[in-house]
Image (cartoon, helix red, strand yellow):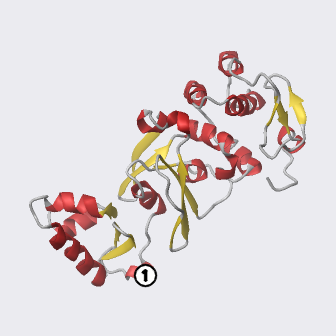
Amino acid sequence: MDSLDFFDQNPVFTREEFLAHRNAARSPLTSRNLLALHVARGRLVRVRRGLYATVPRGVEPGAARVDPYLVATKLAPDAVVAYHAALQFHGKAYSVSNRVTYLTRRRLRTYRFRDAEFVAVRCPAPLRALPDMGGNVLDQPHAGGRVRVATLERTLVDVLDAPNHGGGWEEVWRSLESVEFFDLDAVVEHALKRDSSLTVARVGFFLEQHRQTLMVEERHLAALRAHAPVQPLYLDRKREPGKLVQAWNLVVPERVLSRSWGTVA
């Protein structure tokens, strides 16, 4: 497979992937020069240092669409599209956003490319040593390449654990309520991996609030309830006042209890 064939089959790729394709026996400098040549000729777009996107034949580089999920997947070796970006990838986000969140074990700065903002979220400490940062990660074809993305089950836990990366409580609730089905065993298993009583309580409260629509069984709630906080905690880390939901020892704001979204989360 020559370079042009490689470009056609890899809409977004790293320099290391191209060097591996070119064969380690060849000069890395020659391969880098070849990439620079194709950028100059308009066959490639340099997304950032060491990361390239292919320009379809007959399209101007500035007009070529570069898929943000493919880019996010390549921004770190372990990158996983997550949080609100995962909801959007799965078609379940209530609102559309150009902010693309991805999980990684690394500390990386926010990066902008064209109209997209790529936000790295460092994996929670209890999950960093686990395969796939705790699992529930899909590797699936998309836009001619492959995307590593969190499952909806993991995403439910993720956005309740860090609602700021889900767009706030209203966006989180409305988005999750658009999902018709969750593998609840997977949700419970992933929630317990977090080693956080607050996260467990948030997940438990959400599932109990949607018990009928999501067909939540008592065993799911009991498994979570066993790890709920011993002392009352606020649903929101800003300590927004609300009503104590005793089953979860969770102080929940009225707007979340009643799902009346008159204020911005």
Q: Nearer the viewer, residue 177 or 168?
A: 168
Instruction: Say which residue label 1 marks.
Output: 62
Residue at 64%, 44% (x, y): give it.
Answer: 159
Q: Amino acid at mark 1?
A: Gly
Q: x, y (%) of residue 101?
A: 55, 55
The answer to whether residue 136 is visible is: no
Q: x, y (%) of residue 25?
A: 9, 60
Residue at 43%, 61% (x, y): give it.
Answer: 71
Which quarter of the figure has residue 223? Answer: top right
Q: x, y (%) of residue 106?
A: 46, 50
Above or below — where is 178 with respect to 26?
Answer: above
Which quarter of the figure has residue 233? Answer: top right
Residue at 73%, 29% (x, y): give it.
Answer: 201
The answer to whether residue 257 is visible is: yes
Disc 1 crowd rating (10 Å Cα; few below 14, some 14-19, many 20+) is: few
Quarter of the image containing the N terminus? bottom left
The outermost residue toward the left is: 25
**Side of 264 relative to 53 (left or right):** right
Residue at 56%, 65% (x, y): give it.
Answer: 117
Instruction: Label 1: state its secondary structure.
Output: helix
Above or below — where is 159 with respect to 99?
Answer: above
**Side of 94 relative to 255 (left or right):** left
Q: x, y (%) of residue 64?
A: 41, 75
Q: Nearer the viewer, residue 95 or 193?
A: 193
